[in-house]
Image (cartoon, rainbow, N blue to C red):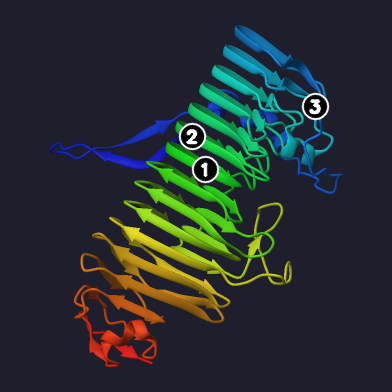
């Protein structure tokens, strides 16, 4: 059980604050009972195949037919074996069903990428509808796994609990699609995200759900493909809200999430730097707990970010980091140049609308951040280099404002209020590139700012 970071104030003579408690499956099955299972470190030095094997062992197989089952229990403790396989253009409808899966995966790559050992595995242009289903898995197994371009799973009004490594809640791969609604999820193992997509892509749609992960590297959302989330409350104790690798897309609306490791989001390219990734946060809140955790972290990627009516609450006071870096395979720390020299600076463009944000922008190693405040937004903070060169562009429309908290050096500095009266300098200076064409409206002059600071050409 955990508490929402949102509080509700009552309009009474004496104001009372009440916390809203949110339950998840770990309130029923204590993670302490499976501490040894959750402590297993995945071994990725094992054989890997590039396509899903044709034969997936399963205790119960539904193939090439349509089946409906209700009020029944399924279980298996066999190793390297899924409990239920739905394959070869089959359709399976389960309602009020309990599924328990234990038994180890000898090859965690196969378990992770192809659903070996999953409680429910849907493949080969098949469809499954899971309603009021209770799924418990141990020893390294996904609760629900779907693979293939024409494979779809619907998970509604259900309860998902897992322990052990790479034990994701709902996992889509090979261009498979998952629709998830009114689900409570918990995972305790390493790299066991609540809702995940994987190579070449997975398409995840989640609404009205609760997620809780405690394992190192276990995010709420792992985006390799596309993530669409609406009204999700989540805590990732040892991971970010979102992991994203490469040119993927994640859209969160009306979500309230908390992250305990790396950043509120950790978005990167693990190989060659790619462009075209999208992150959209709308009417949402991301809270980060670590003293050095940013709200949004980007490495070795080029990405467009949209923040609409959104809060980033950070203990670190850092909103955005752009870096020449990536994440290690265990998803536990940021890799340095010594880990991988084949990297490039991050290029991050952030559009902020209808939002009030407090914190700094930090860029490392020739990375850049373009920060646009629009539609009645306000920002309290500054921009600075964490190491080496850093490049910042700031834009304000006529309805937005900026309160400086440190001296800031900018490449492009554009403001629809050409008098700069929407800036409270608090005694700090803005240094702008007088040679940049977009800064021509400033005339290369030093301009006094409200609060005692100045905009100074360099």
What label sits on residue 300 in the rendered view? none
Residue 305 versus residue 281 in the image, above or below: below
Q: How many marks?
A: 3
Residue 277 versus residue 149 in the image, above or below: below
Residue lying at 50% horizontally and 78% vertically, measured from the top left:
390
Name the secondary structure under disc 1: strand
- Sequence-wise, the earlier of marks 2 and 3 is 3
Is residue 418 left or right of 238 when viewed as pictured? left
Residue topped by disc 3: 56
Spatial CA distance of label 1 from label 3 is 27 Å
Residue 366 versus residue 352 in the image, above or below: below
Residue topped by disc 1: 227
Can residue 223 be seen here? The reply is no
Residue topped by disc 2: 206
Spatial CA distance of label 2 from label 1 is 8 Å
Extreme-top residue of the structure: 71
Can residue 81 be seen here? The reply is yes
Q: Position of residue 108 (x, y in %)?
A: 78, 39
């Amino acid at each position: 059980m955990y508490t929402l970071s949102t509080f509700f104030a009552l309009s009474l003579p004496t104001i009372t604050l009440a916390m809203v408690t949110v339950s998840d499956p770990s309130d029923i099955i204590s993670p302490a009972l499976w501490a040894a299972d959750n402590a297993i470190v995945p071994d990725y030095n094992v054989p890997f195949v590039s396509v899903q094997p044709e034969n997936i062992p399963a205790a119960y197989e539904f193939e090439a037919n349509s089946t409906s089952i209700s009020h029944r229990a399924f279980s298996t403790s066999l190793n390297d074996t899924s409990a239920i396989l739905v394959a070869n253009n089959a359709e399976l409808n389960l309602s009020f069903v309990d599924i328990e899966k234990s038994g180890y995966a000898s090859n965690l790559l196969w378990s992770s990428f192809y659903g070996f050992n999953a409680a429910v595995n849907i493949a080969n242009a098949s469809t499954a509808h899971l309603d009021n289903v209770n799924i418990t898995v141990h020893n390294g197994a996904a609760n629900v796994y779907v693979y293939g371009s024409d494979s779809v799973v619907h998970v509604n009004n259900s309860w998902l609990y897992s322990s052990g490594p790479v034990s994701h809640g709902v996992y889509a791969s090979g261009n498979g699609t998952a629709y998830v609604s009114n689900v409570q999820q918990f995972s305790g193992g390493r790299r066991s995200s609540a809702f995940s997509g994987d190579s070449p892509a997975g398409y995840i749609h989640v609404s009205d759900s609760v997620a809780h992960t405690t394992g190192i590297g276990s995010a709420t959302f792992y985006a390799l493909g596309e993530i669409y989330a609406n009204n999700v409350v989540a805590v990732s104790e040892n991971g970010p809200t979102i992991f994203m690798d490469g040119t993927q897309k994640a859209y969160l609306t009306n979500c309230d999430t908390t992250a305990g490791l790396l950043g509120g989001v950790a978005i990167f390219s693990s190989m060659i730097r790619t462009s075209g990734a999208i992150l959209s946060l709308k009417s949402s809140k991301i809270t980060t707990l670590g003293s050095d955790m940013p709200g949004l972290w980007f490495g070795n990627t080029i990405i467009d970010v949209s923040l609409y009516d959104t809060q980033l609450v950070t203990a670190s006071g850092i909103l955005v980091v752009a870096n020449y870096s990536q994440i290690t395979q265990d998803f536990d720390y940021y890799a340095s140049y010594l880990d991988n020299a084949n990297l490039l600076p991050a290029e991050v463009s952030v559009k902020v609308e209808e939002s009030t944000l407090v914190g700094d922008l930090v860029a490392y190693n020739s990375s850049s951040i373009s920060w646009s405040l629009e539609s009645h937004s306000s920002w309290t903070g500054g921009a600075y280099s964490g190491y080496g060169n850093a490049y910042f562009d700031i834009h304000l429309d006529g309805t937005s404002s900026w309160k400086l908290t440190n001296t800031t050096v900018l490449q492009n500095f554009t403001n629809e209020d050409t008098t700069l009266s929407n800036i409270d300098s608090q005694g700090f200076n803005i240094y702008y590139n007088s040679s940049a064409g977009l800064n021509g409206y400033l005339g290369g002059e030093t301009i006094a700012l409200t609060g005692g600071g100045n905009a100074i050409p360099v």
